[in-house]
Image (tube, rainbow, N blue to C red):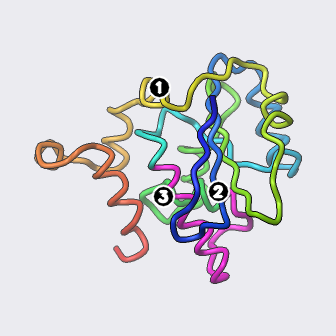
Amino acid sequence: MHLIQKLELFPDHRVTQMLFKEVKNPAELKKSAMEGKINGALINPTMLVDPFQVLVAANKAVHLEKVEKMKTRTLYSEIIFNLSPTNNISDAFKRFGISDGDDSVLIVMVDSKDESQDVSDIAARVEGRQVPVEELSSLSDHAKIKKLYKVTPQEEKCGSLLDAVVCRMATKDVM
């Protein structure tokens, strides 16, 4: 049900993604995350194309944490910020973080060899139905994603939407 992947550049770290639909308590989850009671990033899955997009954001966040160059205060807020094509932190949270009216959520956790998290503990806090992470693309709002990342029709002819999104995420610091 959940997806666990090791980070290639940081083999001692792994990223766990869990997807939930029909979530009844998004406001409570958001509050818990802000208070540090949920050790993970709570992401609005409608703004995601593929789980790989989250893996890229998590990899970048771990790298920035290791070199002490994060733009936000926590690893999980940095993951959400890294999903955004802009350098506006509050805008990233509005677009990619969950809001009170959302009915689906992707929870992303990063742990290392030294510390592991109990996935079932976090999953138990969600009043909703866990579904395979592979269903993420069925929740995507492609029109909103294309508009946010400014993907042109010509660009889609030579590559995928995921390619365009990941390219913008990776280059936002140099643009």
- Give how far across and how far down residue 68 sits, in percent: 67, 82
Residue 165 lies left or right of residue 19; in this view the side is: left
Residue beneath label 3, please? 56
Distance of mark 3 from mark 2, alpha carbons? 12 Å
The local secondary structure at tag 2 comes to strand
Which mark is drawn over residue 139? 1
Mark in front: 3 vs 2: 2
Screen quadrant of the C terminus:
bottom left
Q: Earlier in the sequence, mark 3 or mark 2?
A: 2
Give whichever of 164, 6 is nearer the camera: 6
Amino acid marked by disc 3? Val
The local secondary structure at tag 3 comes to helix
Q: Tell me which segment is drawn in magenta.
A: 53-77
Prevailing secondary structure of the magenta residues: helix
Residue beneath label 2, please? 14
Give whichever of 128, 31 is nearer the camera: 128
- Give how far across and how far down residue 39 sits, in percent: 80, 50
Total labels drawn: 3
- Quadrant of residue 112 in the image? bottom right
- Give how far across and how far down residue 49 sits, in percent: 40, 39
Crowding at dot 3, Cα within 10 Å, few <14 / some 14-19 / many 20+, comes out as some
Residue 93 lies left or right of residue 32; in this view the side is: left
Q: Which residue is at a point 85% across and 41% down the rendered structure image?
A: 32
Q: Which residue is at a point 63% across and 34% down the rendered structure image?
A: 2
